[in-house]
Image (cartoon, grey):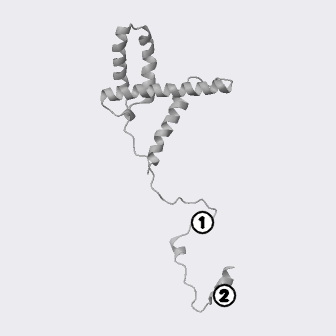
Amino acid sequence: MLFHERWHVELVFDEVKTHLRLSARTLRSRTPEGVVQEVYGLLLTHIAIRTLMLEAATAAGVAPTQLSFTGTIRVIDESLPALSLASPTQRALLIQHLFAEIAAQRVPAQRLRFQARVVKRVRSKYERKLPIHLKAPPLEAGIDFKDFIALVT
């Protein structure tokens, strides 16, 4: 029943592993402590981006799941130079403009992710039974049960 919800978790893994990776190597640290620090950094960055998306979605009156994560990263990347050079009075206006741009980054409507529960066809070296094979002739009436067991074994 909640199988389709699993895809939201898979999307988070994809966002962290693929879209937040800033270099060809996933983790650049050479010590275990550095790897832990980088993983915390990636997770904090993901939380910060998702928080911005939540605030932008709330301001625009849409669901946060309708906003594009990669589009948000692009908007933030393009806005950072202007935000760093802005005065404190201009920064509030630029942040409101940033929220509007993030809210404009929409994803297409998501389809429900579920599969019908059916029996999968097992790959076998034997041919598939035809309908004629399913109508096997009945056993002879005169055969004893003990004789039948002897035939099977």
Q: Is residue 44 left or right of residue 64?
A: right
Measure the C-alpha gap from mark 1 to mark 2: 30 Å
**Which element is circle 1 on?**
loop
Q: What amino acid is at disc 1?
A: Glu
Q: Is residue 75 visible?
A: yes
Residue located at (66% from left, 87% from top): 147
Residue that badge 2 annotates? 147
138 versus 114 height, above or below? below
Residue that badge 1 annotates? 127
114 versus 93 height, above or below? below
Residue located at (37% from left, 38% from top): 109
Q: What amino acid is at disc 2?
A: Asp
Q: Residues within 10 Å of mark 2 (few under 14, many from 20)?
A: few
| Residue at the extreme left of the image, as rendered | 61
List x then y, in percent, for residue 38: 59, 25
Q: Is residue 147 left or right of residue 11?
A: right
> Disc 1 or 2, which lies upstream in sequence?
1
Residue located at (56% from left, 23% from top): 22
Q: Nearer the viewer, mark 1 or mark 2?
A: 2
Residue 86 numbered tag: none
Snapshot quadrant of residue 93 = top left
Residue located at (45% from left, 26% from top): 49
In which quadrant is the C terminus drawn? bottom right
